[in-house]
Image (tube, rainbow, N blue to C red):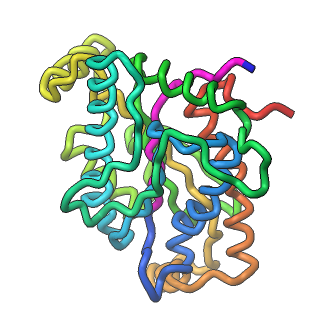
């Protein structure tokens, strides 16, 4: 079996209200979805590696942006650092979770460069085969230049319970529909220079990439302007009333067992989307 070639690196972040009493509220459906997805990701890919990371934003929904942007910038910097080390040493670095000193915002799942033990599988090969092939994926990918994708998991009032709405890009590409969490994230990304401007010409975008790479001292040319945004909304339905207070009470109320089950069942379809983003069409599960 030929090892798949990574197309992008992937930072998967959920936004909502992580702490009690709103942990299982409808507004925190993105967090619930992410926790359900993590074992599916490991089963599909078969290993954890430094080219994707999952993270739950600890801030309240309406102020998610600053914490998410700080964590994303640290992750992007670590991606560049790994490539510099690989190019310098011309060998595969043993990769493990990087603890960022003073970063109290990070609540990320660990990433390591080895296969994980799995009592339910004889070899834990996952979808993509032997450990030698896994190492080939990492080695080849470290020597390539490719962009990063920020995948944001959030609740979606405009979709039926458990249904997905996937949109690419920022507010210029698709409306945020008044979602305050997404508005906070986009404002912070824009302030950090991470939000692409759709009105720029190809020549201007190339110039911005070169300038960003020069500022970051990254000889690969891999820069913040390469960042793609994937917004994955998980449907929570909408109350009959359009009154603002009624909607607020609805999203802050706890999900019923039926609703929780519907959110968790969406994990596999979301992983399909993410695997396609990570590996391209060749990385999709067949059948």
* Res 34 quadrant in image: bottom right
| Magenta-span inclusion, residue 5 | yes
| Magenta-span inclusion, residue 21 | no
Q: Which residues are magenta?
A: 2-14
* Res 95 quadrant in image: top left
How far across and down, in percent of the image, does residue 239 sit? 62, 78
Q: Nearer the viewer, residue 159 or 85?
A: 85
How far across and down, in percent of the image, does residue 270 sit? 65, 49
Left or right side of 25 for 150 = left
Q: Nearer the viewer, residue 12 or 262?
A: 12
- Asked whether the viewer can see residue 261, the reply is yes
In this view, 15 is above or below 46:
below
* Res 35 quadrant in image: bottom right
Left or right side of 13 for 80 = left
Residue drawn at x 39%, y 18% as measured from the top left? 145
Residue drawn at x 26%, y 44% as measured from the top left? 73
Left or right side of 182 for 159 = right
In this view, 77 is above or below 58:
above
How far across and down, in percent of the image, does residue 90 sit? 35, 16
Residue drawn at x 28%, y 51% as measured from the top left? 69
Q: Nearer the viewer, residue 228 or 141?
A: 141
Q: Quadrant of the C terminus?
A: top right
How far across and down, in percent of the image, does residue 96 sit? 40, 45
In this view, 225 is above or below 11:
above
Farthest residue to the bottom: give it.
Answer: 21
Residue drawn at x 34%, y 34% as measured from the top left? 79
- Asked whether the viewer can see residue 243, the reply is no
């Amino acid at each position: 079996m030929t090892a798949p070639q990574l197309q992008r690196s992937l930072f998967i972040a959920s936004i909502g209200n992580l702490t009690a009493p709103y942990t299982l509220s409808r507004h925190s459906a993105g967090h619930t979805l992410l926790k359900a997805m993590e074992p599916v990701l490991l089963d599909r890919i078969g290993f954890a590696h430094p080219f994707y990371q999952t993270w739950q934003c600890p801030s309240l929904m309406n102020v998610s942006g600053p914490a998410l942007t700080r964590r994303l910038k640290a992750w992007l910097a670590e991606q560049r650092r790994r490539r510099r080390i690989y190019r310098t040493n011309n060998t595969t670095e043993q990769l493990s979770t990087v603890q960022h000193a003073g970063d109290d915002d990070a609540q990320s799942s660990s990433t390591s460069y080895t296969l994980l033990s799995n009592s339910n599988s004889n070899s834990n090969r996952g979808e993509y085969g032997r450990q030698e092939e896994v190492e080939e994926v990492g080695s080849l990918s470290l020597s390539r230049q490719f962009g990063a994708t920020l995948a944001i998991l959030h609740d979606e009032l405009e979709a039926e319970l458990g249904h997905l709405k996937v949109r690419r890009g920022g507010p210029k590409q698709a409306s945020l529909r008044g979602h305050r969490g997404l508005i906070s994230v986009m404002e912070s990304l824009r302030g950090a220079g991470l939000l692409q401007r759709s009105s720029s010409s190809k020549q201007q975008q190339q110039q911005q990439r070169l300038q960003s790479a020069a500022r970051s001292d990254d000889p690969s040319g891999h820069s913040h302007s390469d960042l793609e945004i994937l917004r994955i909304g998980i449907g929570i339905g909408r109350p009959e009333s359009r009154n603002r207070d009624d909607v607020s009470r609805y999203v802050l109320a706890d999900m019923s067992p039926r609703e929780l089950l519907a959110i968790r069942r969406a994990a596999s379809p979301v992983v399909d989307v993410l695997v396609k983003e990570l590996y391209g069409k060749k990385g999709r599960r067949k059948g």
